[in-house]
Image: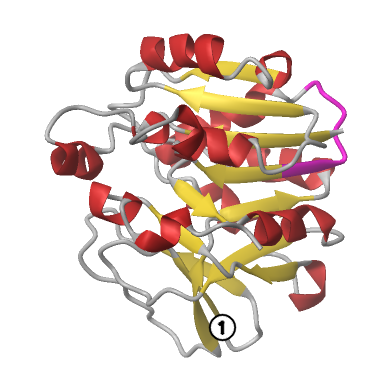
Amino acid sequence: MRIMIITVAGVASRFSQSIGCPCLKCLYYKNDIKESLLYHILSQNSEIDKYVIVGGFKFEELERSIHQYFSQFYDRIILVKNEMYEKYGSGYSLYLGLNAIKDLNYDELVFAEGDLWVDEESFRRVWETPGNVITCNNEAILASKSVAFYYDREYRIHYIFDTTHSLLEIREPFQGIFNSGQIWKFSQKDCVQKAMAGLTQEEWQQTNLGFIQRYFGCLNQEGYKIVNFQKWLNCNTKFDFDKDEFYFADT
């Protein structure tokens, strides 16, 4: 079984500010719902057995839209409500998504943040690449918007992110630094469960990188593959959404 968790619970204040009103970013479009980030990511791979969508902000609108516009996916969607989306960080949404599938027997699990646009070919490579997968992109690494990862002396992986979007800091020598594609594949359910059990309640209330670091941080280079996204956008504002690259046809 293939499962995908997509988290769309956040308020997305920067995006709403750029629109001029409160907006559920994952459903935003100009002409057709198929332009929305959520529809795009759901339509990327027909072989996914279950989609777990974790919402919070404007949850009723999300629920209505899925009923109305996402009928082709509806029988595969598990919709989860994060009641604490204003109080807790993104880690709690991921926790709720993982908790919703704890009794399911899956072979592969992909987690994607819900404000991303990725070309179909690159996304397909995430599923087709055997084993665990981390992703990167070719965008500049900016503290204002990037989730980054680096290799330490022993090539162990470390994720860094600033919730205030101000500065990134690395306090040790490193071998290389990359801009994360913010999509990950987990191929070992027992390791997922172990990583979940290793986090405290307080850690789950912070960013989702707590779980990501717990899972991938203990692996050596042979324990995972890297997929480099060719076309990738993190839509923090309407300006990002409106970039010409967003409408490039997949090749």
Query: Within 10 angstroms of label 1, few (less than 14), some, or many (20 or more) residues?
Result: some
Q: Write the residue at 45% across / 9% down.
A: 64
Colouring chosen for the image of the structure:
secondary structure
Residue drawn at point x = 26 percent, y = 29 percent? 23
> Is 29 situated above or below 173?
above
The residue located at (40%, 55%) in the rendering is: 234
Nearer-the-camera pick, 35 or 47 = 35
User: In the image, which residues are magenta?
Assistant: 103-109
Q: Amino acid at mark 1?
A: Asp
Quadrant of the snapshot with the C terminus: bottom right
172 w.r.t. 56: above or below: below
What percent of the width, then of the height, locates residue 242? 31, 52
**In x, y percent, where is residue 16?**
20, 36
Res 219 → quadrant: bottom right
Asked if residue 1 lies in the magenta stretch, the reply is no
Picture coordinates of residue 83 (x, y %)? 39, 16
Q: Residue 206 falls in which quadrant of the image?
A: top left
Q: Nearer the viewer, residue 30 or 134?
A: 30
Q: Nearer the viewer, residue 182 or 72?
A: 72
The relative height of residue 197 versus residue 162 in the rendered view (above or below) is: above
* Rendered location of residue 139, percent (x, y): 42, 73
Q: Main secondary structure of the magenta part?
A: loop
For label 1, the residue is: 152
Is residue 125 among what the camera can see? yes
> Could one spot residue 198 in this view of the protein?
no
In the image: residue 196, left or right of residue 61: right
